[in-house]
Image (cartoon, rainbow, N blue to C red):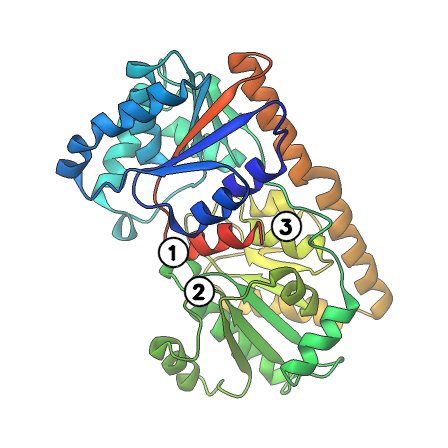
Amino acid sequence: MLVRLIHNGDRSQFEHQVLSLRSKGDFGAILEQASIRVDALGIRGWADGVLKLAALRRIIRSFRPDIVHTWLYHANVIGGVAAFMWSDAGVVWGLHSGWLAINHTKRLTRIMRAIGAQLSGWLPKNIICCAHSVREFHAGLGYARDKLTIVPNGVELERFHPDEFARRKLRSEWDVSPSQLLIGMVARFDPQKDFCTFLDAAVIVRRQHPNARFILCGPGFEPSNEQVVQELGKRNLQQNFILLGFRSDIPRVMAALDTLVLSSVYGEAFPLVVIEAMACGVPVVASDIGDIQRAIGRSGKAVQPRSPRQFAEGILYYARLPDEERRSVAASARERVATMFTLSSAVDQHEALYRNVSGPTPSVATPVEPLPIGDQVRQARDLA
C-alpha cells in the first residue's frame, strides 16, 4: 500500500523519502525507478540498531521533513522517537494489522506494540488505521482512541477489472475449460492463511463438481513446496489443484476465477486481495475476521474461520447461480469497490491528513519496517 500511495500521490505537492530499518528490498528498487529516494539502515538486531542511530539522525536532519509517517510497530516507535528528537516534523503512525496469534508473533513485536501504546498519547499527531477492527483492537490495547483515524485500503479500478480475454487465455494455459468451475486463493504461504482449510473445502466441493479446479497463487505455493504437495496428496487433490507460486499478473489471474477464497485465521485487517477480486467482478468467500464482512457487504460470503463446510457452502452457492444472477453479483461487487474502496480515495485521505498535520506543501519521510519477502514482492509488483 505504501508504494501505491506514493506512486499515485500528488508529486507536485508532496516530496517523499523512504527509509527502511533493514534493507531496501524489492519495493525499494521500484520506488527508486520512480525517482523516490530510498535509504536503508541495514539494522541487524538491537546492538546494531544502537550503532545505526547516528546514520538515522543524519538522514532525518538532511531531509528536514515536515511529516514523518511511520509504518508498523518497530518503525512507529523508532521513527517516531527519532523524529521527535531530531526534527520538528509532525509524526503520523500507520497500523495495518489486527489480532496476532502469540505463537506466530515475535516477542520483540509484542514489546514494540506495547511501547507504542504508551507513546501514542503524545508522540504521534495522528494514527492511521486501515480498518475499523484495527482501531478497536489497538484502542483496547491502550492506544489513544482520539488519534485513531480510519483510512481503508483502496484498489486501482483501471488495473483490476473484469477481463474476458485474460479469463479465456489463462484458462486455456491451465487446461481449464470456459465452463469449468475454477476457485482460487491468492496469498503467500504462511500459517496465517490456513490453506489446509481451503483444501478441505475443495474436497467437499469436488463431491458435487468432480471436474472443479483450484488454484493456489502466491510466494511459496510452488510445486517445489513439499508441505503443500503432501497436503494435496493426503486428500487426493493433486489433479484438481494448480500451484502457480508468485505471479506478476494478479489482475489477470483474478479475472480467470469464478470465486476467490481467503481462509485466514488471524491478523487480517482489510486484505487488499478481497477488494481486488471484487473489482474484477469475482465473488469472495472469506473468513469473517477483521473488516472482511464490512468490505464485501452482500457481494460475498464471510464465514467462520477453520470451517471447511462453510467455505464449501459459500463456493457452491455461487456455483449454482444462474448466469444472469452471477452477472448481477459481479456488477454489485465492482460497484461497491468503486464507491467505497478506490485507491484515489485512499490517496486523497492520506494527503488531506498530511496537510492537516503540517501545512500546504510538506515533505514526507517514511520509515518502514522490513517486510516479509512475500509482502516485499507484492508491493514491488504494485508498480510494475
**What is the CA distance from the residue labelled 2 to the residue labelled 1?**
8 Å
Marks 3, 1: nearer the viewer? 1
Instruction: Give coordinates of residue 354: x percent, y percent.
Output: 54, 20
Task: Tell me the residue that label 2 is attached to.
Answer: 219
Q: Kindly indicate whether the residue at mark 1 contacts the one at mark 2 (C-beta within 8 angstroms).
A: yes
Callout 2: 10 Å neighbours few (<14), some, many (20+)?
Answer: many
Task: Tell me the residue that label 1 is attached to.
Answer: 373
Mark 2 / mark 1, whichever is N-terminal: 2
Mark 2 / mark 3, whichever is N-terminal: 2
Instruction: Give coordinates of residue 196: x percent, y percent.
Output: 43, 70
345 vs 20, nearest the viewer: 20
Which amino acid, by three-letter code, is at mark 1? Ile
Q: Secondary structure at mark 2?
A: loop
Which residue occupies 69% across, 60% down?
Answer: 283
Instruction: Give coordinates of residue 134: x percent, y percent.
Output: 46, 35
97 vs 61, nearest the viewer: 61
Which amino acid, by three-letter code, is at mark 2? Pro
Callout 3: 10 Å neighbours few (<14), some, many (20+)?
Answer: many
Task: Tell me the residue that label 3 is attached to.
Answer: 275
233 relative to 351 in the view: left or right: left
